[in-house]
């Protein structure tokens, strides 16, 4: 039974309008996307724009140019080993392969330079050039580099080359993982979309309160109250 019609119908009106806006948000009216998809793409592009670490990684890699290393790497299978072998050869390293096992001898700086060149191309969404370079899918190239970097880190630590291992891990995390995860997303600066960003954040707060007040007024209109 309704005890306060003003509060009840205020709550009902808020709930109806909340529902209409909810339907609008999930309608493909934002360039063919719904509101969540549009904002998800927007925030992904903004976060990508602030996650470009390749120049700094290249500076760090330059410090180990001329550093000769010998690496013993065991891949999951011969096919993967063959693909990784080709990548090290492109880096100027000498590689001996036996089934899934690789013995890599080369310049650590040159290996990382080649890895970061592929990483940079993928960050810039120039995957076709990476695919043509090795004859496999561009994302597979970055995955192979990631796998190789993980094994390199382990073997360098075994040799007590801890600084070199740390650098390889940094390239893996800040370079390879970033480029892989953000591939095909166009980077943007938040300053270019600050109006939409501010609107979305303010709207989120208002929309949450909107629903809360709608439910509160409905219950109070029904005469329901919280008591201690």
Image: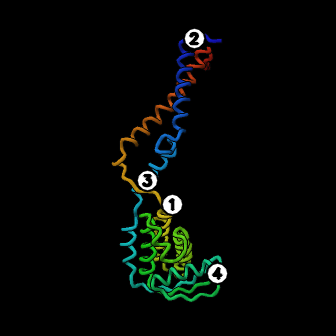
* Residue at point 58%, 17% (across, down): 220
Residue ID at (44%, 84%): 107
Q: Do callouts 3 and 4 mark residues in contact (Cβ within 8 Å)?
A: no
Distance from disc 2 to disc 3, alpha carbons, whole Å, reads 48 Å
- CA neighbours of label 3 inside 10 A, class few (<14), some (14 to 19), many (20+): many
How far apart in space, not on screen, are marks 2 and 4 (Cα)?
76 Å
**Which comes before the other along the chain, label 2 or label 4?**
2
The kind of secondary structure element at disc 1 is helix
Mark toward the viewer: 2 or 3: 3
Work out whether mark 2 precedes mark 1 in sequence or the reverse, and give the earlier one: 2
Q: Are marks 2 and 3 in contact (CB under 8 Å)?
A: no
**Distance Cα–Cα, label 3 vs label 4:** 37 Å
Residue located 56% across and 76% down the image: 151
> Is disc 2 in contact with disc 1, using a CB cutoff of under 8 Å?
no
Q: Which mark is residue 181?
A: 1
Pointers 1 and 3 in contact (CB under 8 A)? Answer: no
The residue that disc 2 covers is 4
Determine whether the residue tagged by mark 2 lies in a helix, strand or loop.
loop
Image position, residue 71 (x, y; %): 53, 84
Residue linked to disc 4: 78
């Amino acid at each position: 039974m309704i005890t306060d019609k003003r509060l009840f119908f205020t709550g009902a009106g808020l709930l109806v309008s909340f529902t209409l806006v909810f339907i609008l948000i999930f309608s493909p009216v934002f360039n063919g996307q719904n509101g969540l998809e549009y904002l998800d793409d927007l925030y992904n592009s903004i976060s990508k724009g602030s996650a470009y670490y390749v120049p700094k990684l290249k500076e760090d890699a330059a410090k180990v140019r001329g550093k000769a290393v010998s690496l013993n790497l065991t891949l999951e299978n011969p096919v993967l080993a063959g693909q990784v072998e080709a990548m090290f050869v492109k880096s100027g390293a000498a590689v001996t392969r036996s089934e899934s096992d690789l013995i890599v001898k080369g310049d650590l700086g040159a290996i990382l330079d080649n890895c970061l060149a592929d990483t940079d191309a993928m960050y810039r969404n120039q995957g076709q050039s990476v695919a043509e370079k090795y004859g496999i899918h561009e994302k597979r190239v970055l995955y192979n580099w990631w796998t190789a970097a993980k094994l390199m880190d382990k073997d360098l630590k075994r040799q007590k080359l801890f600084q070199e291992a740390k650098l390889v891990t940094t390239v893996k995390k800040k370079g390879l993982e970033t480029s892989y995860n953000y591939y095909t997303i166009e980077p943007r600066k938040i300053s270019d979309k600050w109006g939409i960003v501010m609107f979305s954040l303010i709207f989120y707060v208002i929309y949450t309160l909107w629903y809360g007040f709608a439910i509160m007024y409905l219950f109070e209109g029904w005469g329901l109250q919280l008591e201690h």
